[in-house]
């Protein structure tokens, strides 16, 4: 999958930027959770538990943003 590394990183960055512009308070809390050691998968799972499965796309965006913040491809 290394042929998609840069694309994946750019998509994660875009998710972070979108979240930061459209939901800055949530972006701040995602950043805080990541700084405290939460993995991107844990962020997604928490969002889904908290807001429900009908917001799956939002939870995936939070996961992608967390991956960007954590510096993981």
Image (cartoon, rainbow, N blue to C red):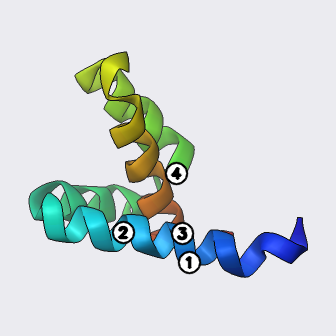
Q: Is residue 44 left or right of residue 5?
A: left
- Residue 12, how many percent across, how many down? 51, 67
Q: Which residue is mark 1?
A: 10
Q: Nearer the viewer, mark 1 or mark 2?
A: 1
| Mark earlier in primary sequence (1, 2) | 1
**Mark 3 residue element:** helix
| Mark earlier in primary sequence (3, 2) | 3
Badge 1 vs badge 3, beta-carbon distance below 8 Å: yes
Residue drawn at (17%, 70%), measured in percent from left and top? 21
Q: Nearer the viewer, mark 2 or mark 4?
A: 2
Q: Which residue is mark 2?
A: 16
Residue drawn at (54%, 69%), measured in percent from left and top? 11
Which of the two residues, 47 or 5, is positioned nearer the viewer here? 5
- Residue 15, how many percent across, how many down? 40, 64
For residue 31, which numbered disc appears in the image?
Answer: none
**Mark 1 residue element:** helix
Q: Which residue is mark 3?
A: 11
């Amino acid at each position: 999958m290394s042929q998609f590394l840069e694309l994946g990183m750019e998509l994660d960055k875009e998710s972070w930027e979108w979240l930061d512009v459209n939901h800055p308070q949530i972006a701040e809390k995602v950043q805080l959770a990541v700084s405290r050691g939460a993995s991107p998968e844990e962020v997604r799972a928490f969002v889904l538990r908290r807001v429900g499965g009908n917001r799956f796309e939002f939870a995936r965006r939070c996961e992608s943003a967390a991956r960007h913040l954590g510096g993981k491809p």
